[in-house]
Structures are given as C-alpha cells and as structure tokens.
Image (cartoon, helix red, strand yellow):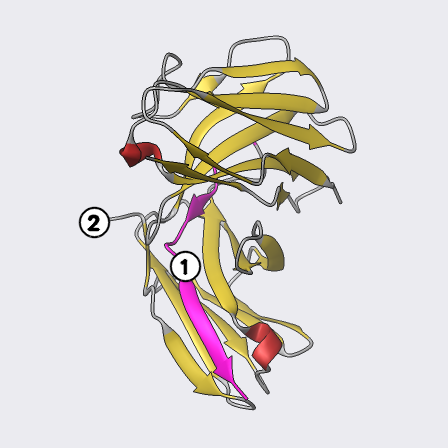
Amino acid sequence: QKEVEQDPGPLSVPEGAIVSLNCTYSNSAFQYFMWYRQYSRKGPELLMYTYSSGNKEDGRFTAQVDKSSKYISLFIRDSQPSDSATYLCAMRSYSGNTPLVFGKGTRLSVIA
Amino acid sequence: SAVISQKPSRDICQRGTSLTIQCQVDSQVTMMFWYRQQPGQSLTLIATANQGSEATYESGFVIDKFPISRPNLTFSTLTVSNMSPEDSSIYLCSVEDGRGGNTEAFFGQGTRLTVV
C-alpha cells in the first residue's frame, strides 16, 4: 500500500460547481498536510497548509483533515476555468528536515 | 517566499548522453531538493542537496546516475547521466522555508526531459 493515495482523475466539472478532491494516507505519523496546484508546464505552488484536524478556509478553498480516518480533502467552491490544473496533496511527519510525501495528483478541468 | 529559476525548461536528448539542470534561488537556503515527476506518478524525491557536503539520496537513486552539486547557498545542479528513455520525466528543484511551524516548499518551473 502506498503511503499516500490520490485518485488521478481526470475530473471534469462545469463552471460554478463545487469540487471535492481527496487523499488517504497510511502513516499515522503524518502531521502536516498541504495542497499544491500545478498548472501545465509549471512547478507546483502551495494552495493550503494545515496541521490539525478540522477545516481551514481561504477564499473559495477549504482544506479538511480527518486524522482519525487518515483522510484529507480540498473543496473548491464556485469553480472557475482558471482552476483547471493538477492538484497534489502532500504531507510530512514533522516540520522541515523530513521529506514531503506527495499523492499522484488529480487533474481537474472546469468547463465554461 | 523564494523565487526559483530552473533551466533548461525542456530538452530532448539522445540516449547515452548526460544533461545538467541548473537551479538558482533568489535567497540563501540551507537545503535544496531535487524531485522527479513521471507521467501519472507522484513527485518523487531524488536527493537533498546540502551545501558543503555530499547530497543525500533517496532509496532507488544513486550518485553515479544523478550527481548533484551545491557550490553555495543559492545554487545547485542535477545531472542525469547516461540517459535512457526511462529517464524521460519532469525534474523539479525545490527549497523549503522553515520559518516557525509552517514549512512551505517552493518549486521551480521544472525541466521537461525527453530521451530519444
């Protein structure tokens, strides 16, 4: 079993839809959870960062962590065509000095 | 935040040759990282480039195949040696900002390598 599982999609939604992206993990030592967005031919950029169970909101984006279920989610409200990208979850055991472990990424297309 | 310049952005290379990828950061950083991103796969850490010492390689990656230099705190290179088509991938340079408990990883735009 891989440490981090993420459905690669592709996921196609109409503009304005709510998008739900998910990752599961097996290592209970993971404490820090991130979502990265990667546009085509670009490097990943950090979208959301959280280290506790619960929800964290930033504009149209909400990151949700359930450590008891080893499950994290990213919700995108009122999705826009500019949200079309690959979304990667990432996590690590401690802050710094331990490698990030990435999911495979989910390719999202928002259709106008 | 850190701004990372990575070059070349893409290249097509003949098998058996080597390619050196450069990574320049706009600020001094302790650790720089090199990742590989193969189609349909996770970002995989190749090695951590340490200034003043040898790079630390992850399981499955060896120095002979992926030699790394780190001459100072703002620059690193990754060489992909004796390339084969299986080395076709995106290679990414990354640095981390470890202020407080929020350690954010910043990435270059990547080098898209095709080996023919």
- The x and y percentages for residue B2 are 74, 41
The residue beneath circle 2 is A1
Q: Which residue is drawn at 39% across and 18% down?
A: B81
Question: With B98 as the anchor, is A99 left or right in this view?
Answer: left
Q: Which residue is drawn at 36% across and 27% down?
A: B14
- The x and y percentages for residue B13 are 41, 30
Q: Quick one: A105 or A66, which is closer to the camera?
A: A105
Mark 1 or 2, nearer chain start:
2
Asked if residue A94 is positioned above or below residue B57 in the image, the reply reads: below
Asked whether the viewer can see residue A56, the reply is: yes
Occupied quadrant, residue B106 = top right
Amino acid at dot 1: Gly
Amino acid at dot 2: Gln
What SS does tag 2 mark?
loop
Asked whether the viewer can see residue A98, the reply is: no
Occupied quadrant, residue A57 = bottom right
- Asked whether residue B13 is drawn in magenta, I would say no
Distance from disc 1 to disc 2, alpha carbons, whole Å, reads 17 Å
- The x and y percentages for residue A46 are 61, 55
Q: Quick one: A97 or B18, which is closer to the camera?
A: B18
Question: With A61 as the anchor, is B47 left or right in this view?
Answer: left
Asked if residue A79 is positioned above or below residue A67 in the image, the reply reads: below
Q: Quick one: A30 or B83, which is closer to the camera?
A: B83
For this orientation, the residue located farthest to the left is A1
Question: With B55 as the anchor, is A47 left or right in this view?
Answer: right
**Magenta segment range?**
A97-112
Callout count: 2
Mark 1 neighbour class, 10 Å CA radius: few under 14, some 14 to 19, many 20 or more: many
The residue beneath circle 1 is A105
- The x and y percentages for residue B46 are 42, 29
Image disc number at residue B35 = none
